[in-house]
Image: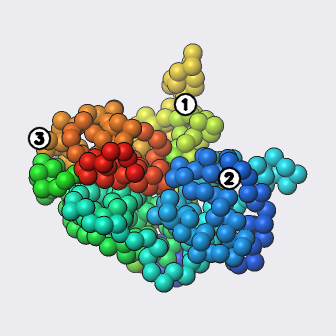
Amino acid sequence: MMIESLSYMPTSKESNDSLAKHFTDLAPALNARQAAIEASRCLYCYDAPCTRICPSDIDVASFIRNIHDENINGAAVGILKQNILGGSCSRVCPTEILCEDACVRNHDAEGQPVKIGLLQRYAIDNMKLEAHPFKRGPSTGKKIAVVGAGPAGLSCAHRLAMLGNEVVIYEAKEKSGGLNEYGIAKYKLTDNFAQKEVDFLLQIGGITIKHGQTLGVNLQLRDLHTNYDAVFLGLGLGASKQLGLTGEDAPGLLAAVDYIAALRQADDLSKLPVPTRAIVIGAGNTAIDMAVQIQRLGADDVTLVYRRGFESMSATEHEQHIAKENQVRMRTWAQPQQVLLDADGRVQGMRFEKTALVNGRLAGTGETFDIAADAIFKAIGQGLEETSISDPLATTLKRDGDKIHVDPQFRTVLPRIYAGGDCVAPGQDLTVQAVQHGKLAAHAIHHDINGLKEAA
């Protein structure tokens, strides 16, 4: 159910200009002096642990040294060589559990890591390149279809084009960018950054994007397989998981990702429906993003509920802290039991059952409590859209649970069909991981379809 299920609710009491101030950068950018000081804190470690843990293999110490030496273009190109979406990743990547957590500065007298994410953003935002930093290789005469213009698909397409191949991207939505455009909190990616990054990426040439093309609806995998030398599936996870409760389709209960997408695309924030009281169910970054944003839009009371304890939440401690700073109430050890409806069949709250670990397994205690709410937002995970893999050829793809099975080279069980990003089993559902999948899959595709003796 889309955001229209909240259309009967009032809009914010604040003006669009006033609300926009609540969605400025979560972490303000460094200025030149701050960047110089921060870069000077780096020890430029040999075999740096920050580099080793980076999912996209960015040479962290090298780009920070370039910033220190005032070679901003060199720093930026070093980042983009490994991660063409390095600008968005510097904003949304959970650096607090990756490179910054690995920083050796955590263990010295200062006890504070180098601000790697902000330095990466500084390099990308302040580069001054006369042209796109990468040139296309000699034409291979090969043509590849990429399904999905999200981080995995864009990364794959850019690297394939760089290697001399022609690429056509098929995207279901009106805009490219995937979660960067539709699924990230508005205060994390501001100023239309996702589209600016796509425009920059396309400067490599050799990439065409066709929008409004949905696999399983007006686009069939069998046709792509016939008409292209290879196909890369960067489908993402577009289907929100269900609670499995009666009343789940009631007005006032919807997927958090639907509201976040509407929020990110809204020209006037003051026209969005805003509940007075809201419940968010989930434990990941999407749940945090939803709870914080609905609070900032003017909801009086926002409660995030999770069935286990804080230590089991997939949202990092940093994200949890953001929620608490924004007056989001967080209830743990409780699972949804019943959707409470009013006389008109609209959401008026939810009944929860308290939970506990019994012999190491989660179980209900039988004790319940109610939370009143005008809206309930589900953020309990997402799966593959079944329509996207419903054609005769796609149904033969091997699955790992609700994801597509691939080998270490991102090959599916079908010849010349590859997949990567959130729709496959390996790795975490992170933007930076999706970018890496796309890049590595591109090398495997280029190697396979061009009959090279060894992978690039």
Q: Are marks 2 and 1 in contact (CB under 8 Å)?
A: no
Residue type at mark 1: give it: Lys
Residues packed near mark 3 inside 10 Å, few (<14), some (14 to 19) or many (20 plus): few
Residue 249, x across and y down, in percent:
29, 47
What is the C-alpha distance between the residues marked 2 and 1? 36 Å
Residue type at mark 3: give it: Pro
Camera-side residue: 325 or 230?
A: 230
Q: Which mark is residue 354?
A: 1
Q: Is residue 156 visible?
A: yes
Residues packed near mark 2 inside 10 Å, few (<14), some (14 to 19) or many (20 plus): many
Residue type at mark 2: give it: Glu
Residues packed near mark 1 inside 10 Å, few (<14), some (14 to 19) or many (20 plus): many
Closer to the chain start, of discs 2 and 1, is 2
Q: Which residue is mark 2?
A: 100
Q: Secondary structure at mark 2?
A: helix
Residue 183, x across and y down, in percent:
42, 59
Camera-side residue: 359 or 130?
A: 130
Q: Which residue is mark 3?
A: 392
Q: Secondary structure at mark 1?
A: strand
Q: Secondary structure at mark 3?
A: loop
Residue 357, image quadrant: top right
Residue 140, x across and y down, in percent:
25, 61
Observer-side mark, 2 or 1, equals: 2
Observer-side mark, 3 or 1, equals: 3
Task: Write the residue at 48% across / 80% down.
Answer: 16
Give the answer, above or below, for where 266 lies relative to 128.
Answer: above
Task: Write the residue at 22% across / 48% down.
Answer: 388
